[in-house]
Amino acid sequence: MQFTFDTILFLISSAFVAGGIDALAGGGGLVTIPALMAASIPPVSALATNKLQSTIGTSSAFLTFLRAGHVDIRQFVLPAIGAFLGALAGATVVQFVNPIFLSAIVPLLLIGMAAYFLLAPPLSGEDRHARLGRMGITLCMTSIGFYDGFFGPGTGSFLTTVLVAFAGLGLVRAIANTKFINLLTNVAGLTAMIVGGKVLWMLGFGMAGANILGNQVGAWLAIRYGGKGIRPLLVIMSLALTVKLLANPDNPLWKMF
């Protein structure tokens, strides 16, 4: 596909913002996936290209948190494996979904994301007693992994919420370990998309460079200040993108009624 300079600049800027949001609280896909679809990229290719740039950006944030000593790989290796397998399955399934249907449900999923960010309880910054054991956490992560492979936006926030609410982690440690698990779900989803031949490589690598910078800024802010204050922004962003997509008279959603 050929893109104008303005379109490429728009997509790279979106990737930078998404990287910062991802490192802080997750939800960067709420920026990049609608942006890619607005550039007339087919839905599955948009998901695949987003997965490429997100994988590279997430690995950057993960290394930052790892060097800071906030990641516990031994404790979360089993949940991470479950998330990996779930994402592999989700990314395989989505390639067999009708693109028209996928385009139509994206606005509905964005509305769901806005409701989640608006209604989810505030997350604690202090470590607490875990409410679920390792197998329970693994089942949660496997389910979220499937969602990440199938669609993706908000995955980081879902993972962080589970780690705070059920694994007993404080907010910064939860965000850090989310990067570890999210990296594996991204790798799994990207692998399935590569096999399916859906990735736009040059665009994905260009966006990845901006995503790395955004992730570094976001990871620094998360370590220094925590992930507070980002959720209202995500609610506004989700609703704004929903309005933008629904305002398009060619959106397949209108053809379903």
Image (spheres, grey):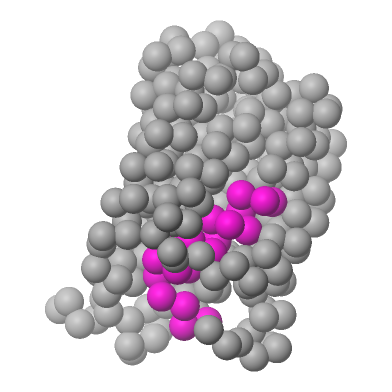
Q: Is residue 182 visible?
A: no
257 horizontally vs 54: left or right? left
The residue located at (44%, 65%) in the rendering is 198
Q: Total label count?
A: 0
Look at the picture and state if 182 lies above or below 55.
Answer: above
In the rendered image, residue 207, in percent from the top left (x then y), is placed at 68, 66
The residue located at (42%, 22%) in the rendering is 138
62 horizontally vs 108: left or right? right
Look at the picture and state if 67 lies above or below 202.
Answer: above
Q: Is residue 247 visible?
A: yes
* Residue bounds of the magenta highlight: 39-57
The residue located at (69%, 60%) in the rendering is 208
Look at the picture and state if 38 lies above or below 88.
Answer: below
Which quadrant of the view contains residue 178?
A: top right
Main SS of residues in magenta:
helix
137 drawn magenta: no
The residue located at (32%, 59%) in the rendering is 95
Which quadrant of the view contains residue 172?
A: top right
Look at the picture and state if 19 lies above or below 59.
Answer: below
Q: Nearer the viewer, residue 185 or 220?
A: 185
In the rendered image, residue 205, in percent from the top left (x then y), is placed at 67, 64
In the rendered image, residue 67, in percent from the top left (x then y), is placed at 83, 28
In the rendered image, residue 123, in percent from the top left (x then y), is placed at 59, 31
Which quadrant does the C terminus fall into? Answer: bottom left
Q: Nearer the viewer, residue 67 or 228?
A: 67
